[in-house]
Image (tube, rainbow, N blue to C red):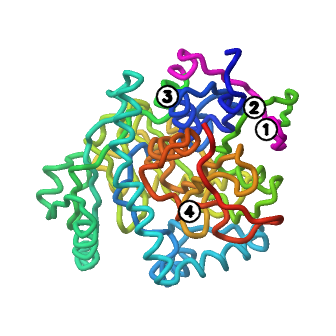
Amino acid sequence: MDGLDPRSRVAVVGAGVVGMTTALALQRQGFEVTVLDPEAPGSGASYGNAGFLATELIDPLATPATLRLAPRLLLDPHGALALPLRYLPRLTPWLARFAAAARPTRVTQGREALAALNGVAVAAWRRCLADIGAEEELVASGYLLVWESPAGRARARAQMAHLRHWGHEVEWLEAEALREREPGLTGALSHGLFCPGGHQVRDPHALVTRLAEAFVARGGTLCQARVARLEPRGEGVRLHTDQGPVMAGQAVVAAGAWSHRLAAGLGLSIPLETERGYHLTLPARGQALRQPVGSAERRCVMTPMDCGLRVVGFTELGGLSLAPIRRRYGSLRRHAEALLRDPAGLDDTAEEWMGFRPTLPDSLPVIDTHPDHAGVHFAFGHQHLGLTQAAVTAELLAARMAGEAPALDLAPYRVTRFSRRRGRRQETGHCPA
């Protein structure tokens, strides 16, 4: 690659679904790319997600309704929200920012920004997968949201109106129609909503593996190394790793729940918190359901995939160090047993997993360039929507780095939106190609 502009050599920190889609998008723009991660591609949060593109999730996590509901969820031993007491002192400043993000004006802005990304997410994934000949990894499955109690009718009607307002096709299903749509569910259901435009992937870990294989086949380099610090230099960026220094013309931080640590070394204070997500995977039950199913009351999701039936739930704000809390798996078993017509497979053969979701108080990712170092870029903080928004994030950031106008306004996703950084102010513009 001699004779290339040094800036065309890019190091991507993170081999999850966001990092690998970004690496491929940069290759399509003509960059020479190296991806660095201490683990194999897709081994982190990308491995254990629910496996469906949650494009209907356009409401930020912080809303007045969430704040009102939080005490009840915390008191429920099987509720969807958990705050480990030993972590609470460290969490308090973030919770204050989360409460501030629930102001109506900020919720409206956040909803518009999430809808903008989610509205083009499926199309971006189709382009990404078509480019590498892996279209079959994305399945037009539809998505089913169910209620067990008739008391939830008003909420379901409001949810249907809300989704239709934002352009989603939604069908109302009574109990009998629910049984016809999804015979794998228990008959003890009241009503539900079906979104025929929903999509899922066959297996999120297998998907990231295919992305990585295509990346390497096109000349990309995978480097198993942990990046401790980024050092912008006149000729580019030096990445300090546990395998020695790596030089690149530009760098992209897509390290998920660890990204804010690298940003802090560059003078940026970013209030990223870790949502610990739990799952059960039932290897022999991949055909138990026809499509992803969410429970409105239990706040869990079950997705049939090639690797089995996956049961996902919980928002546990507990950082990166605490061990998994065993009773969370028991709660997932309880929810799945109540929802499935045949709960076989919820015994010790179920795979248990816990991973880390990177979440910011306003639920929006960071898709931006460092305001003072034009060779450092960011793509992280996608909370529950990393799989959903990965391909579109990659396209947007790669366009910016190539000197093109991104297809969406990136202002809502700027890295400096929470606080001013140390040092002088510069405008964030397009990076030179």
Of circles 4 and 1, the one toward us is: 1
Q: Amino acid at mark 1?
A: Val
Q: Residues within 10 Å of mark 3 (few under 14, many from 20)?
A: some
Of callouts 2 and 4, which one flags the residue occurring earlier in the amino acid sequence? 2
- As measured in the structure, the alpha-carbon distance from the residue carrying label 1 to the one carrying label 3 is 22 Å
Which segment is the magenta one? 213-238
Q: Residues within 10 Å of mark 4 (few under 14, many from 20)?
A: some
Q: Are marks 2 and 1 in contact (CB under 8 Å)?
A: yes
Residue at the image point whose x is 61% and y is 54% from the top: 429
User: In the rendered image, is residue 227 in sight?
Assistant: yes
- As measured in the structure, the alpha-carbon distance from the residue carrying label 4 to the one carrying label 3 is 36 Å
Q: Residue tagged by mark 4?
A: 315
- In the image shown, does 249 or 169 lie closer to the viewer? 249
Q: Residues within 10 Å of mark 2 (few under 14, many from 20)?
A: many
Q: Residue tagged by mark 2?
A: 248
Q: Position of residue 362 (x, y in %)?
A: 56, 69
Of callouts 2 and 1, which one flags the residue occurring earlier in the amino acid sequence? 1
Q: Residue tagged by mark 3?
A: 28
Of callouts 4 and 1, which one flags the residue occurring earlier in the amino acid sequence? 1
Q: Is residue 46 above or below residue 407?
A: above
Residue at the image point whose x is 69% and y is 33% from the top: 7
Of callouts 3 and 2, which one flags the residue occurring earlier in the amino acid sequence? 3
Q: Amino acid at mark 3?
A: Arg
Q: Residue tagged by mark 1?
A: 237
Q: Position of residue 26 (x, y in %)?
A: 55, 33
